Image (cartoon, helix red, strand yellow):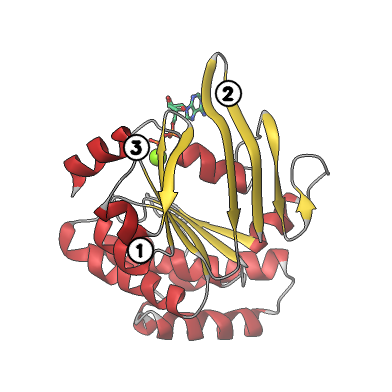
Amino acid sequence: MIKVMDLHKTFGKNEVLRGIDMEIAKGEVVVVIGPSGSGKSTFLRCLNLLETPTGGDIEFEGTSLVKSKQDLNRLRQRMGMVFQQFNLFPHMSVMDNITLAPKKLKNLSNEKAQKIAADLLQRIGLADKAGSYPGQLSGGQKQRIAIARALAMSPAVLLFDEPTSALDPEMVGEVLDVMKELAAEGMTMVVVTHEMGFAREVGTRLVFMDGGKVVEQGKPEEVFASPQHPRTKEFLSKVL
Ligand code: ADP
Ligand code: MG
């Protein structure tokens, strides 16, 4: 579904991604871990062109993202993103947050968009929050709404950038549970996280990044049990 080829990204003189190669198949849950500053967010942001790669290419559903001119709206409909800070629109109700993009970008009628949103809210256990505003919700609820908002566009892939890092500990579980359910339903996901339990339980592949490169990857249980690279060993010894 996604093929990343020798992806490079520099900011000024700072080479943040130094040649990343990766293939992601439909239904995979790729968990990306690595120290702060290793380029994890930049990698995710390059995938849906929130950042423009400075070298290499990305293929998504058979088309080159770098070499051909992209309809960015379409791309981001197919590749949804969930951020650490939720990024909900504070002045809009939960219902309007979820229905805005389907109405604007997919030309869905208000009725149809509301039906989709209501079904999603039901699924994440927040059916009673349709009329609430983000400011009235807990962090865990906000993040579940952000996931529902991404799902409302029926994406082929969901990208998560540290979706639980801004949450109080008691709210991490409810967000991870929604993500686990999505994975079980076959959603293709790329997840940057420090939640090693999630990585082990849900990840089909664990990718360790350091210094803008993929240093090591493999089945999560194998990488956890016997990391091959000294950098991976050192990192895991600190977080496990
Ligand atoms: P991670 O998510 O692994 O912590 P990032 O991808 O956020 O790492 O950042 C990697 C490096 O890229 C850091 O040195 C950061 O300062 C730099 N960087 C990220 N985004 C920008 C930007 N928009 N402009 C300049 N430098 C950036
Ligand atoms: Mg980051």
- Give the image quarter of residue 31: bottom left
Residue 143 coordinates in the image, percent (x, y): 37, 62
Q: Residue at x 30, y 63 (%)?
A: 200
Q: How many marks?
A: 3
Q: Amino acid at mark 1?
A: Lys
**Vertical relation: 39 (above or below) 49:** above
SS for callout 1: helix
Q: For the residue carrying disc 1, how many other residues have a C-alpha within 10 Å: few (<14), some (14-19), or many (20+)?
A: many
Point out the tag, 1 or 2, that comes first from the N-terminus. 2
Task: Give me the disc on residue 142.
Answer: 1
User: Which residue is label 2 attached to?
Assistant: 10
Q: Amino acid at mark 3?
A: His
Q: Residue at x 41, y 86 (%)?
A: 122
Task: Give me the disc on residue 32.
Answer: none
What separation in Å lies between label 1 and label 2 (alpha carbons)? 33 Å
Q: Is residue 136 visible?
A: no
Left or right side of 210 for 27 = right
- Give the image quarter of residue 171: bottom left
What separation in Å lies between label 2 and label 3 (alpha carbons)? 25 Å
Q: Nearer the viewer, residue 227 or 207?
A: 227
User: Which residue is label 3 attached to?
Assistant: 229
